[in-house]
Image: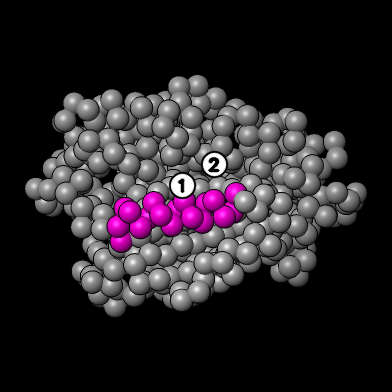
Amino acid sequence: MNIKPEIFKAYDIRGKVPKELNVDAARKIGNAIAVFLSRKYKKQKLTLFVGSDVRVSSPLLKKALIEGVTSQGSAVVDIGIVTTPLFYFALSNSRNDGGVMVTASHNPPEYNGFKVLGKGLEPVSGESGLFAIKKLAAQKIQSSPKVIGAIREERGWTERYISCLAKKAKIGKARVVIDAAGGSAALILPKLLSRFPNLIYKPLFFTPDGTFSLHNPNPTLAEAQDFAKEELASGSFDFGVIFDGDGDRILFLDEFGKEVRGDFITALLAGWFLKKHRGDAVVLNVTASKAAEEYIMAAGGKSIRSKMGYVHISPLMRQKRAIVGGETSHHFYFRDFAYKESSMYALLKMLEIVSRTPKKLSHIVRPLQKYHTAPETNFSVKNKKSAIASVLKKFARGGKVSRLDGITVDFPDWWFNLRPSNTEPLVRLTIEANTKELFDEKQKEISDFINGLA
């Protein structure tokens, strides 16, 4: 099989199995990753950690990937089926030259892929290595070393991760609905939650299901939220959460089943940490609400904006020594966990917050609901760069312009961000305004203009 170039994305490798990604491709990619990292670190024999999610295609793809890596003489530490945050935890607490997580995250079950990291948990993105790996994978690389790299299994990381998480949280009485989506989180949650005797929870889909037969592993989809919302309708719980397939994303629902924005959860978490770490930085992405930024500043924090995606937010957090960071896509990052995601830590800390107040989550989040906005809107365009330039020329007059990620134009009573998709011929629009009338006006005005460019 020739390597399908379209499986190499801006942040990871991902495609349908076996049409776009199969064992032959996985073997070549493993080979290429070993060669790339060996050259990068000027080290012939590496030690790479490899983990995988629960997808039915993961065992064979992982086996083939490992064969490719070891064919170059590098060693592999196989840590088994894990969540992506647990994979990060293992990397950050061991000696290694990087690793590969076999996962397609929140994608449907027919997908799978690879998330690649270098030394020091450095994410390998398109520009920083994935596109070079793509070229190497397309070549015929010989297995040059005389000795095949060793493979060692380590299965103790789950217990270490659970112990670390449990020590960092003190939860009072709380009742919560937890949907593991049949993903990797289902293997950790029962043992973790048993450490907190005051916690009552309703488990949903705590049996690993590599086909995700009961609901989609993407928690942002309405169909994936139905089960948790049905339980919350009883009125017996403080809030609910839904994990994605590989456990790196967690979506919060208030006690009424209403989705809580990811940037609002980031702000609440930041407020909690800033009580002890006043003056520390908190990282938000470019589409986060001004309300989250204002909340963080009022709590004594420094709010810093990041480009979208974990390959940007995690290194920026490390650079600024940020206490917490988050994305509107429901990813949450912590200094306590090597500036990487930990959805379970986010859950424990939100339980800590809620259990120490008589208020429900809807009341706690209410101060952040100051402005009017809507989910990001996608537009199909012929030329992304030209479309953004045209919108900038038309709508930026009198506004403060930032080019951190696409364009953000800030006015006294509204702002908008327009950024290009990394993988599709799309531009993505976010608008926030002080009033609903102004939001509706600007949303229509800019949307009509972009549609007119197509």
Q: Who comes first in sequence, dot 2 or dot 1?
A: 2
What mark, if any, has residue 248 been given in the picture?
1
Q: Is residue 191 above or below residue 208?
A: below
What mark, if any, has residue 100 been given in the picture?
none
Query: Which secondary structure, mark 1?
Result: loop
Q: Is residue 414 above or below residue 426?
A: below
Give the residue furthest to the top. Answer: 213
What mark, if any, has residue 105 been given in the picture?
2
Which x, y percent locates residue 308?
Answer: 52, 59
Query: Which secondary structure, mark 2?
Result: loop
Main secondary-structure element of the magenta-colored stretch: helix
> Would you say 235 lies left or right of 76 here?
left
What's the magenta region?
Answer: 434-451
| Neighbourhood count class around disc 2 (C-alpha, 10 Å): few under 14, some 14–19, many 20 upward | many
Measure the alpha-carbon separation of dots 2 and 1.
Answer: 8 Å
Q: Residue at x 74, y 41 (%)?
A: 26
Front residue of 186 and 235: 235
Quarter of the image with the N terminus in it: top right
Amino acid type at circle 1 is: Asp
Front residue of 447 and 352: 447
Which x, y percent locates residue 435?
Answer: 30, 57
Amino acid type at circle 2 is: Ser
